[in-house]
Image: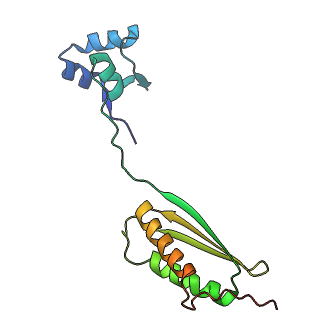
């Protein structure tokens, strides 16, 4: 975020002062300024400090992000593909397009382990985690828990 900067003339106009008075404030240290070439620039926050005004509050976006890692053991390649498709489909539909969920799925075939990494809005992440919980605890055949060593 870039702070607004004023010239000596602009500060003088705003405060109804003579330009020489503003320059005197700068030389005495009463008003902070940055010298750029032969001209001074005064930050809005420094002008507010001189006039005794509280600096404008920085708006809080209210944006929160959650990161979650789900590890599922005992998952073969076919079950990992089915579960990955379900999770990615759910993450890419029905959510705010301005704040999409970011999902990465990693399957370790040797350990028969699936990791799902989810980053995003708390509510959307919670929905996805509820879906995962329902699938993992349901006997619907989507996730066959038997692992066959090859």
Q: Is residue 40 above or below residue 25?
A: below
Q: How is the image coloured?
A: rainbow
Q: Is residue 110 above or below residue 141?
A: above
Direction from residue 120 to residue 16 in the image, left or right: left
Near-viewer residue (133 or 92): 133
Which quadrant, please, contains the N terminus?
Answer: top left
Which quadrant, please, contains the C terminus?
Answer: bottom right
Which residue ends up furthest to the left in the rendered image? 16
Direction from residue 22 to residue 123 in the image, left or right: right
Q: Is residue 43 visible?
A: no
The quarter of the picture where residue 34 lies is top left
Which residue ends up furthest to the right in the rendered image? 150
Q: Residue at x 46, y 66 (%)?
A: 126
Q: Is residue 127 above or below residue 13?
A: below
Rendered location of residue 71, percent (x, y): 65, 70
* Count of numbered circles on the image: 0
Rendered location of residue 50, percent (x, y): 31, 16
Q: Is residue 41 above or below residue 82?
A: above
Q: Is residue 10 visible?
A: yes
Q: Residue at x 42, y 67 (%)?
A: 124
Rendered location of residue 64, percent (x, y): 43, 54
Near-viewer residue (140 or 23): 140
Q: Residue at x 20, y 18 (%)?
A: 15
Near-viewer residue (140 or 36): 140
Q: Residue at x 27, y 11 (%)?
A: 20
Rendered location of residue 60, percent (x, y): 36, 44
The quarter of the picture where residue 103 lies is bottom right
């Amino acid at each position: 975020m870039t702070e607004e900067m004023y010239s000596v003339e602009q500060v003088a106009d705003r405060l109804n002062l003579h330009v020489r008075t503003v320059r005197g404030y700068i030389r005495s240290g009463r008003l902070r300024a940055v010298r750029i070439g032969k001209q001074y620039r005064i930050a809005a926050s420094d002008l507010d400090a001189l006039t005794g005004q509280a600096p404008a509050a920085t708006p809080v976006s209210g944006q929160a992000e959650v990161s979650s890692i789900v590890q599922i053991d005992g998952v073969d390649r076919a079950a990992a593909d089915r579960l990955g498709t379900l999770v990615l489909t759910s993450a890419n539909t029905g959510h705010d397009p301005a704040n999409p969920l970011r999902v990465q799925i990693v399957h370790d075939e040797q350990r028969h382990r699936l990791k799902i990494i989810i980053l995003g809005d708390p509510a959307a992440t919670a929905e996805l985690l509820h879906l995962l919980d329902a699938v993992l605890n349901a006997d619907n055949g989507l996730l066959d828990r038997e692992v066959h060593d090859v």
